[in-house]
Image: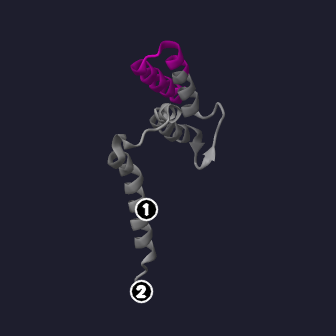
Amino acid sequence: MSGFDPYPWFAIAAIAVATLLTRASFLWLGDRVAFPPRVARALRYAPACALAAIVAQDVAVRGGVVTLSHDNLRLVATLVAAAWCAWRRDLLGTILVGMGAYTLLRVL
C-alpha cells in the first residue's frame, strides 16, 4: 500500500468550491447585478439545452459509438415523437407517441 495521496481530496474540494461559488453567486448577488437583455433571453434556454444534450446522447450513442441510422430504434422513435410535438404541441401526446413508436419498432 502506498502512503496518503492528498491530490484526489484536493481535486474534490476544489471542484466542490468552484461549483458552490458559481451556483450560489446568483443567490448572493441577487438583483445587484443585471444581465443585458440579450444575455437574459439566452439564459432562458439553458435548461432546455442541457436536457436536449442529455437526451441526444442517450438517443444517438450505442455502445460508445454514435449511431445515426434507421437501425437505431431510439433515434427513429425520437424523430417520430419530435414530429408529433411539432405538429400538435402536446407534451403528453409526444410522450405517448414516442413510447408507442419505440415499442412498436422493438416488436417488429
Stretch in magenta: 83-108
Residue pictured at 64% horizontal, 30% vertical: 70
Q: Main secondary structure of the magenta part?
A: helix
Which image quadrant: the N terminus?
Answer: bottom left
Q: Secondary structure at mark 2?
A: loop
Residue pictured at 58% horizontal, 43% vertical: 61
Disc 2 designates what residue? 3
Disc 1 designates what residue? 15
Inter-mark Cα distance, 1 to 2: 23 Å
Q: Is residue 4 left or right of residue 86?
A: left
Instruction: Name the residue at the right extreme.
Output: 69
Q: What amino acid does circle 2 point to?
A: Gly
Mark linked to residue 38: none
91 drawn magenta? yes
Closer to the chain start, of discs 1 and 2, is 2
Q: Is residue 3 above or below residue 32?
A: below
26 drawn magenta? no
For marks 1 and 2, give the one nearer the viewer. Answer: 1
34 or 75, nearer to the observer: 34
Q: Is residue 1 left or right of residue 69?
A: left
Image coordinates for residue 95, horizontal then vertical, percent: 43, 24
Q: Is residue 68 above or below residue 90?
A: below
Q: What amino acid does circle 1 point to?
A: Ile
95 or 53, nearer to the observer: 53
Image coordinates for residue 105, horizontal then vertical, percent: 54, 26
Residue pictured at 63% horizontal, 47% vertical: 65
Image coordinates for residue 101, horizontal then vertical, percent: 50, 23
Q: Quadrant of residue 62?
A: top right
